[in-house]
Amino acid sequence: MATATGQANAKRKPVFVKVEDLKPGTSGHTLIVKVVEMTPVKTSARPNRSRALLSRPVPPARIAECVVGDETGTIIFTARNEQVDLMTKGATVILRNAKIVMFKRTTMRLAVDKWGRIEVTEPAKFAVKEDNNLSLVEYELVTVPDQGMN
């Protein structure tokens, strides 16, 4: 693909990060993680007005909470719909363009939206460090008063 200057865009090599480096409010992460645990979440089938107008019923969303990790720690990953099928216990996956979502405004969860991608890869050779779960760390939103106005 050529740009306005006539130069071809080269694809950037992904920069892989470790679980312990994840911070609240960040996005664009690429990680190689192992699925430690996968728990399906029961979703309620509440009727939605806009969907009630459609002729065919829409199946309820499938959601699973998966504990994923690498040699530096673990975090809860929220898998949605077809992502649930890829997140089997013991599988090694590459999460591309993952983002941190704050759950109940206090704890971190990892998610991949429609702009990201999940790929199953060959089994990892690392052992998951399960005693460092970043989803158990609680954060507090602190507003800092503006220092420039006197």
Image (tube, rainbow, N blue to C red):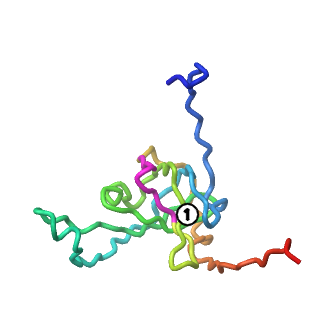
Q: Quadrant of residue 130?
A: bottom right
Number of numbered discs visible in the structure rendering = 1
Q: Residue at x 55, y 78 (%)?
A: 105
- In this orientation, which residue lies closer to the viewer: 119 or 150? 150
- In this orientation, which residue lies closer to the viewer: 107 or 89? 107
**Residue 14 point in image, percent of width and height:** 58, 41
Magenta span includes 56? no
Q: Is residue 90 above or below residue 47?
A: above
Q: Is residue 127 above or below residue 64?
A: above
**Residue 12 point in image, percent of width and height:** 59, 34
Badge 1 crowding class, 10 Å Cα cut-off, few under 14, some 14 to 19, many 20 or more, is many
Query: In what element is the residue under mark 1?
Result: strand
Q: Which residues are magenta?
A: 110-119
Mark 1 sits on what residue? Answer: 100
**Residue 57 point in image, percent of width and height:** 14, 66
Which residue, as the protein is rendered here, is positioned at the far right?
Answer: 150
Q: Residue at x 26, y 78 (%)?
A: 44
Q: Residue at x 49, y 51 (%)?
A: 95
Name the kind of residue labelled 1 in the image: Ile
**Residue 142 point in image, percent of width and height:** 70, 79
Which residue, as the protein is rendered here, is positioned at the far top?
Answer: 6
Seen in the image, is 147 located left or right of residue 45?
A: right
Quarter the C terminus occupies: bottom right
